[in-house]
């Protein structure tokens, strides 16, 4: 699930995007939904076109709009004659009712660097026991670690599928908002380097941008690379700490110098111009949303030691002049996924 839509007056989410994957193509991408009870699925939404495909599997996205704020909806997804089990979600609160945090506050589960399989079983177990205590997830990059299989074993797609199945307990019931990390860039397995089909299908954040569907259209962002959304009395800004700013880590190629990456800017400096515009618009709404929270995969301040013994500032420090120039906006909080490069 992902938050979607925005009403013209308060710019708060008015919908939810439902995303899922199938092994074969279907005649349509359908969501039936309703309120009151799991059996009252009287509304129907259909995806705008065929499912998206970049290699083997098919990826479906259907957006439900004009939903009531703070309301529980039940839904099924699939195609006519082959639907999923029934899930439920709760829409974002009405900002007019969330001003009093003691009565209408919300909780966000924030993490990065999760990964699929045994390495994260304990973490997933803890999240599952707490899933009733948070309203949505904010995953700050390095989602499944599908690129860690470097040699003969092609596991990239299998690991992504496993991760999405393992996290269904929350991602099918709570908005699961993501942003890009370095492990979303491309596939490093030998077959992905040597075989043209794999190389072109699994490079430059292709899987990441196909499998998830964040509200970039509503916020003027680009794909799942950078975007923003509102939830209650908070404005959340999602930065791309990997590409499309001066000296970005993955701005020209991945960190192994194997495949090209970046160049999502539709025009020169589009990312930085969007960030400035988004923060200015959020500042103009401080009377509605006093909080502005920015998230990114990499920390803004970090020192790395290079082999010559010198110390150099992090590459994302090139974003600092912009943030400093907008200091009058009183940025509330910046959240990186960790304090070390992982």
Image: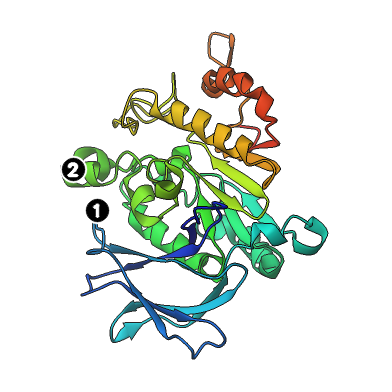
Describe residue 135's horizontal placement relative to residue 32 as left or right.
Answer: right
From the top left corner, tell me how far across and down residue 186 is, in percent: 35, 41
- Residue name at image x 57 percent, y 17 percent: 321
Q: How crowded is mark 2: few (under 14 residues within 10 Å), some or many (20 or more)?
A: few
- Regarding residue 303, the answer to whether it shows in the image is no
Q: How far apart are marks 2 and 1 (CA)?
A: 15 Å
From the top left corner, tell me how far across and down residue 306 is, in percent: 54, 15
Residue that numbered label 1 is attached to: 54
SS at circle 1: loop
Q: How crowded is mark 1: few (under 14 residues within 10 Å), some or many (20 or more)?
A: some
From the top left corner, tell me how far across and down residue 245 is, in percent: 44, 24
Near-viewer residue (43 or 113): 43
**Exactly how many numbered labels are in the figure?**
2
From the top left corner, tell me how far across and down residue 61 is, in percent: 35, 63
Q: Which residue is the extreme one toward the right?
A: 102
**Quarter of the image with the C terminus in it:** top right
In the rendered image, the vertical position of residue 275 relative to residue 84, given as above or below? above
Q: Which mark's residue is nearer the viewer, 2 or 1?
A: 1
For residue 195, which numbered disc appears in the image? 2
SS at circle 2: loop
């Amino acid at each position: 699930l992902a938050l979607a839509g925005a009403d013209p007056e308060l710019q708060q989410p008015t919908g939810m995007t439902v995303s899922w994957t199938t092994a074969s193509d279907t005649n349509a991408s359908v969501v039936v939904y309703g309120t009151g009870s799991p059996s009252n699925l009287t509304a129907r939404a259909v995806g705008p076109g065929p499912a998206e495909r970049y290699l083997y599997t098919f990826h479906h996205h259907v957006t439900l709009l004009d939903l009531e704020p703070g309301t529980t909806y039940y839904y099924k997804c699939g195609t006519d004659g082959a639907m999923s089990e029934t899930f439920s979600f709760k829409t974002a609160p009405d900002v007019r009712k969330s001003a009093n945090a003691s009565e209408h506050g919300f909780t966000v589960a924030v993490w990065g660097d999760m990964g699929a399989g045994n390495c994260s079983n304990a973490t997933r177990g803890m999240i599952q026991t707490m899933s009733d205590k948070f309203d949505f997830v904010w995953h700050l990059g390095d989602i499944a670690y599908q690129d860690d299989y470097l040699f003969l074993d092609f596991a990239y797609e299998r690991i992504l599928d496993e991760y999405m199945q393992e996290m269904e307990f929350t991602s099918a019931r709570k908005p699961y908002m993501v942003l890009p990390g370095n492990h979303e860039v491309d596939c490093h397995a030998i077959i992905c380097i040597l075989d043209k089909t794999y190389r072109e299908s699994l490079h430059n954040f292709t899987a990441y941008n196909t499998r998830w569907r964040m509200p970039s259209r509503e916020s003027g962002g680009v794909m799942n690379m950078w975007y923003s959304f509102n939830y209650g009395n908070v404005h959340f800004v999602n930065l791309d700490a990997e590409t499309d700013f001066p000296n970005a880590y993955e701005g020209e190629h991945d960190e192994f110098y194997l495949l090209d990456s970046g160049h999502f800017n539709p025009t020169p400096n589009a990312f930085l111009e969007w960030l400035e515009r988004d923060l200015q618009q959020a500042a103009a709404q401080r009377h509605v949303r006093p909080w502005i929270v920015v998230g990114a995969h990499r920390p803004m301040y970090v020192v790395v030691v290079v082999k010559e013994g010198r110390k150099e500032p992090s590459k994302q420090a090139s974003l600092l002049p912009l943030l400093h120039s907008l200091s009058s906006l009183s940025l509330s909080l910046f959240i990186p996924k960790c304090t070390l490069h992982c």
